[in-house]
Every structure is written in structure tokens, then in C-alpha cells.
Image (cartoon, rainbow, N blue to C red):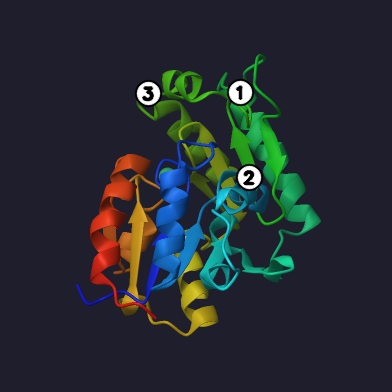
Amino acid sequence: MPTPRLVAFDLDDTLAPSKSAIDPRIGELLLALAERVEVAIISGGQLAQFTAQVVDLLPETDGDHLAHFHLLPTCGTQYYRISPAGIETIYARTLSDDQKQRALAAVEGEARRLRLWESETWGPILEDRGSQITFSALGQQAPVDAKTAWDPTGEKKNSLREAVQALLPDLEVRSGGSTSVDITERGIDKAYGMNRLAEQTGIPLGDMLFVGDRLDENGNDYPVLAMGVECHAVEGWHDTAAFLETLIPTLPAR
Ligand SMILES: [Mg+2]
């Protein structure tokens, strides 16, 4: 591929284990990458996860490199940059109150009907992320092993997704992480976020590279591959670190 001008990353299971902090090695590599190209992170998660998992853990730097980071929580319905003063909002779109109420009612009703509404969870099952309503079967803070065990085939999550989508024809219902279902405006996925990234940076999609762990057809990174962006598939952050160690030396310094 031609040398990318921007490298975009999925967050969970690409830069860090799900809902966990980055390893110091990833922090060093992201900064080294930002010395050469623009660095974007795009995830279904919200800004608080970006700061807790990545931004707060980046190594000390003079601030210049941080200006090359682009943060796109909730698949790019929100867009932030890092300035010396802190996190700077470029834009943030939200669902209407009516859309939120209908989404919350539909997902809870269908989860109960399908017997997927768990009574013992790690934190709330439903979350209003502004631009997205998220259902997490075992709660937002559920440990990775519990989540993996809950729905190893993806069957529960997919049946819930289909049932909720049938009730919300004007909204989009998508599989998120291993136990989660996300409800957004129609047409909001990581491809949407990549298009906003191209608009905001002026960098064409053809000059971008995307790194993610779920580029398979049912994965939440797949829309980026489907839109024709160059993609690199990884299986966890160790894989991402190894890839960056080979990629970074091939990129020209600014
Ligand atoms: Mg992922």
C-alpha cells in the first residue's frame, strides 16, 4: 500500500484488552506514530473510555505530538482533539429524547422477552451515551471471561439485535462488543466515523490505514473494510504492537 498519512485504530481488543488500560508499550508506539502521521481512535465506546484507557496513559510529551491525535467515540458521532488545555470538542451529535426513550424501551422489553435480561450484572445494563443507547448484557464493568462465557457463539446477541431492530425501523441496531448491542441513528458505524475523519482532516480515505480486531463480516470493524479503506487485522494489542514496530520505521518523519 502507499504510505498512509493517517492510521486509525479500533480501541477494545486492538489497542488494549476490552475496557482496560493500554500497555505502556502501546503508549510509546502511539506517540512514535504521531511523530510521523495523524493517529485516530474510533470506537463504539464513549469519551470517558478513551481518556481512561488511552489518553491519560500516554507518556509525557511536549504536547506537539498530542495535536496529531483524533478521538472518535461512539463511532464518530463525537469528535475530539487533544490540546495543551485538555480535550477539545470538535462536535458531538445526540439522539432526540423521543429516539432515546423508544430505544431504551425496545431493548429492555425484547431482552426480557428473550430471557436475556440478567439479574446479576457488573454495573447497569443500559447506558445513554448521548448519540447511542448501549445494552451490555452483564453490565458495563463485566470482566472479560464472564462476557466471553455468556454468548460464545454470538447467538444471544444476534437474536436480540434482530428483535430490537424490527421495533425500531427508523434507528439502527448493531452488535457492539462481545455482549453489547448499540442503537444509533441510521447509518452510524465505523464507516460513518471514517468519513467524518476524512472531512475533518482533509485526508482522503485512500491515504488512511485502519487497524482492528473485528474485520470479519459480523464484526464492528467490518464497515471500514467494506467501504474500501486499507485495513490490517489484528488479534489483540500484542499483535498491534508488533505491527506498529514494523510500520513506524517505514514512515517518513515530519
Ligand atoms: Mg475491537
Amino acid type at mark 1:
Arg
Residue beneath disc 1: 113
For disc 1, the neighbor class at 10 Å (few under 14, some 14 to 19, many from 20) is few
Q: How many marks?
A: 3
The residue positioned 30% from the left and 40% from the top of the image is 235
Q: Earlier in the sequence, mark 3 or mark 2?
A: 2
Residue beneath disc 3: 152
Residue 119 on image: x %, y %: 67, 15
Amino acid type at mark 3:
Pro
> How far is mark 3 from mark 2, CA to CA?
27 Å
The residue positioned 52% from the left and 72% from the top of the image is 68
Q: Quadrant of ligand 1?
A: top left
Q: Is mark 3 within 8 Å of ligand 1?
A: no
- Answer with left or right where residue 252 lies relative to residue 45: left
* Residue placed furthest toward the bottom: 202
Closest to the observer, 74 or 50: 50
Closest to the observer, 36 or 111: 36
* Residue placed furthest toward the left: 1
The residue positioned 59% from the left and 32% from the top of the image is 136
Q: Earlier in the sequence, mark 1 or mark 3?
A: 1
